[in-house]
Image: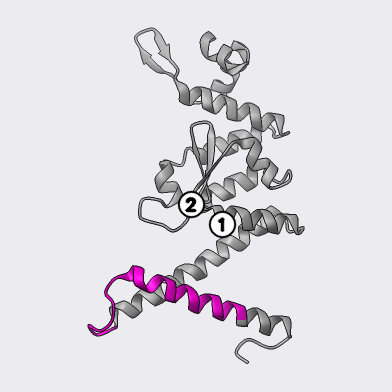
Amino acid sequence: MEELAKEAGITVRTLRFYRERGLIDPPRREGRIAWYDEHHLARLRTITALLERGHTLNGIADLATAFESGRDVGEALGLVEPTEETPVRLTPEALADYFEGQVTPENLANALRLGYLAVDGDEIVHISRRLLDVSAALVREGIPLADVLEAGRRVREHADALAALFLDLLGARGGAGPADPERLRPLAKSVVDAELSMAMDRRLHGERPGQ
């Protein structure tokens, strides 16, 4: 415990307090010896970084609960299957800089639940470079991060339905056409992009849906 506290730059008393609050996992025990490892150190450094950003211990405790969701990083990021998206590894400080002080424990917990973020050691991993950049751009336009995350949740529901629709086309093709769903991907994306563009035009010009 003394060695871990020294490496983390905190006191043994603070480390005991974190353990009592459940902010770090119990050590591995061999008889009377308690072993801490690099994962404990990474968690302590993350806690320190969040505290320096002004977060409370209660908020960090809530976030720690979200971290312990039982999913590994690959599962949490949806990277078990092939994907076109490129994950991004960030320090807590870099993530906070992206979103101009709006990285609250509540927003972090929501992003974790959505699968946008996962924790790997002392780093935070975002599922998609494109989503990260677009989300940050929306926040810079004055949209609260909480609203961006809620919009992302709603978009995902529609995106799942659209993906099911296009994959159903393969099942109903009657033996004709390409059998590889990956060959359908760019065509489906083009249809969705065109329809979304036209829908935005209709909304901006005050037309009712369906006109």
Residue at the extreme bottom of the image, as rendered: 211
Q: Quadrant of residue 165?
A: bottom left
Residue at the extreme left of the image, as rendered: 175
One can see residue 172 in this view:
yes
Label whose residue precedes the other's in the sequence (2 or 1): 2
Is residue 74 placed above or below 197 in the rendered structure? Answer: above
Which kind of residue does numbered mark 1 sit on? Answer: Arg
One can see residue 22 in this view:
no
Q: How far from the left and from the top, in percent, is residue 124?
A: 54, 39
The residue range painted magenta reads 173-197
Q: Which residue is mark 2?
A: 86
Which kind of residue does numbered mark 2 sit on? Answer: Thr
Q: Nearer the viewer, residue 64 or 205?
A: 205
- 186 to the left or right of 47: left
Q: Which residue is mark 1?
A: 130
Q: How far from the left and from the top, in percent, is residue 7?
A: 56, 15
User: Could you tell me which residue is drawn at 48 percent across and 52 percent down?
Assistant: 86
